[in-house]
Image (spheres, grey):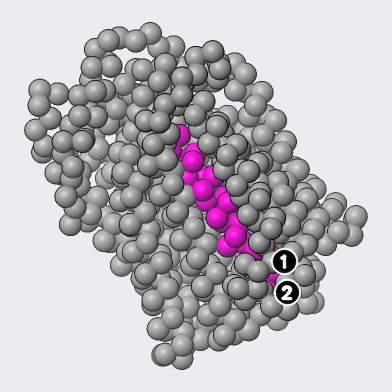
Amino acid sequence: MDKINNKSDIEDIKSNNSVINNNNEIKETKGVSTLLGDPKNAVLKMSIPMIIAMVINSLYSVIDGVWVAGLGGSALAAIGFVNPIYMIVFGFANGLGAGATAIISRYIGAKNKKMADNAALHVIILTIIMAIIFTIIFTLFLRPILLTIGAGQTIDLCMDYGQILFTGSIFIVFSSSGYGLLRAEGNVNKTTYAMFVGAVLNMVLDPLFIYYLNLGVSGAAIATLLSMAFVCVILLYWFKGETYIDFNLKNFIYSNKLIKQILSVGLPAGAEFLIIAILSGTLNLILAIVAGIDGVAVYTAGWRVVLIGMVPPISIGIAIVAVTGANFGGARLHNLKIIHNYGIKLSFLIALAISIIVFIAAPYISYIFAYSPETAGLRDTITDFLRVTSLFYIFLPLGVSSASIFQGLGKGLHSLTITMIRILILEVLFAYILAIPLNIGQYGVWYGMVIGNAIGSIIAYVWAKLHIKKLHNSNIGGG
C-alpha cells in the first residue's frame, strides 16, 4: 500500500545521527526530558494536559453555539454556515502548528538547539504571512462564498458573525502556531493554561456582548476574538524568555529548506482541515435539501458535541506527532511501533467511554442547545443525532493516531491522503447515498458519517502499520 522512499528517510536519519554525535550544547527543560524519554510515558504525559487544553479550546465554538441558540434556529444555522470557512483559517493555522511541532521536535530529538530556534523564527514569519492572506481573502470574498455553500436566507446573520471573526485572523493563526511551538518542546502545561484562560474569558464575554450589549451574533464573534487576542498576549510574554526555544533575531538565518520542511507537514495538515470544512459545507447542503434549515441547525448544534468527543483522540494524536518527531530525529526507529500501538490503545479506551456517556446523556445534552422556545422543537432530533454519532468515536483512534505517525515522520502528504479517503470520499459518499438515493434523509447523513469514518480509519491503520514495518526493517547503513 505504501512505497517508502528509503533513500530520503535514511539520509534524514544519518543527518540526525551526525548532529547527535556533535554533542551540541542543549538546555534540557522538563518538557524536553519527557519528550526524549520513554515513548509510552511521553505520549501519556503529553496527552493528559493536551486533552484538558483541547477540551477547553473546543469550548469556544460550543459556548458560542449555546449562547447563540437563544437567538433562534436561524442564528444557530448562520454560525453553522460560517463554521466551514472558519475551519479553513483555523485548520491551516493548526497545520502550521503541526509543522512546527513535527520539525522542531525532530531537531530537539537530534539535540540541535540552534536549528530548533531558527525553525521557530521561520514559523513566526509564516504565521504573519498566512494571517495577512486569510484576512484579505475572507474580507473581500466572504459573501459570495457563503451564498455558494447555501447560506441563503441567513446571509445577513452570517455576515454579521463572519466579517468580524475573519478580521482578526492574526489572532486565530498566531495562537495556533504558538501552541505548536510549545508542543514541540513538550511544554503542554503552558498550552493548557493559555487555552483555559481564553475559554473562560470567552464564556464571560459571550453573554455580555450577545445579550447585555444587544449585539447578537456579532457579539459572539467579538467575544471570541477578544479572548484569542488575550491568549496571544500571554504567548508573547512566555516567548520572551520562559520557553526552551529562544526567539532571538540575531540568530536568524533564512533557510528555504526550513520553510519547505515546515510546510511539507503544515500545508497537508492544514488541507486536512480544509477537507473537514468541505465536508461540513457539503453536509450542510445535503441537510438543507433533505431537512431544511432545521436539519442544518441540528447538525450545527450536535456536531459541536461530537467535536468535544473527538478531542481525546486528536490530543493523543498531537502528542504522537511530537514524540514520533523526537524519536525519528534521534534515530530511535524501534520506538515508532510502540508509539503507534500505545497511542491507539490509550485513545480507544477513552473514546469508548465517551461514546457510552454521550449515548446515555444525549437527552440532557440536547437541552443545552434547545432551551429556548425558538429551538425547543429540535431537542428530540438533536438527541437522535448524538446517539447515532456516538458510534463515530470508536473507530476514530485508528485513523487519527495513524495519520499522526505520518506527520511526525514529516510525511504530511500521507496524512492528507488518509484524511481525504476517510472524510472527503467515504463520509461524503455514504452520507449522500443514504440520505438521497436511499431516501433516509438527515438520519442517512448521520449514519453515512459513521460508516465512512469507520472504513477510512481501518485503511489508515493498515497503511501506517505497513509503513512503520518497512521503515524499521530498512537498512539504515550503519545508523
Image location of residue 285, percent across then percent down? 56, 77
Please tell me whether residue 452 belongs to the stretch shown in magenta: no
Secondary structure of the residue carrying numbered label 2: helix
The CA span between labels 2 and 1 is 6 Å
Total marks placed: 2
Are there few (<14), some (14-19), or many (20+) residues within 10 Å of tag 1? many
Q: Do the CB atoms of the residues marked 2 and 1 lie less than 8 Å apart?
A: yes
Are there few (<14), some (14-19), or many (20+) residues within 10 Å of tag 2? some
Answer above or below: position of 322 versus 15: below
Q: Quadrant of the C terminus?
A: top left
Q: In the image, what residue type sits under mark 1?
A: Cys
Task: Give the magenta part as a residue range.
Answer: 77-103
**Is 339 positioned to the left or the right of 387 in the image?**
left
**Is 196 positioned to the left or the right of 352 in the image?**
right
Image location of residue 379, percent across then percent down? 66, 76
Say the numbered circle drawn on residue 35. Answer: none
Question: Which residue does the image show at 44% across and 55% down from the upper left?
Answer: 272
- Of 209 and 37, which appears nearest the observer? 209
* Picture quadrant of residue 290: bottom right
Question: Which residue does the image show at 14% across and 44% down from the upper left?
Answer: 470
* Picture quadrant of residue 362: bottom right
Image location of residue 146, percent across then percent down? 65, 69
Residue highlighted by disc 1: 158
Q: In the image, what residue type sits under mark 2?
A: Thr
Q: Residue furthest toward the right?
A: 213
Residue 268 visible from this viewpoint: yes
Residue highlighted by disc 2: 154
Residue 375 visible from this viewpoint: no
Secondary structure of the residue carrying numbered label 1: helix
Question: Which residue does the image show at 77% across and 70% down from the upper left?
Answer: 156
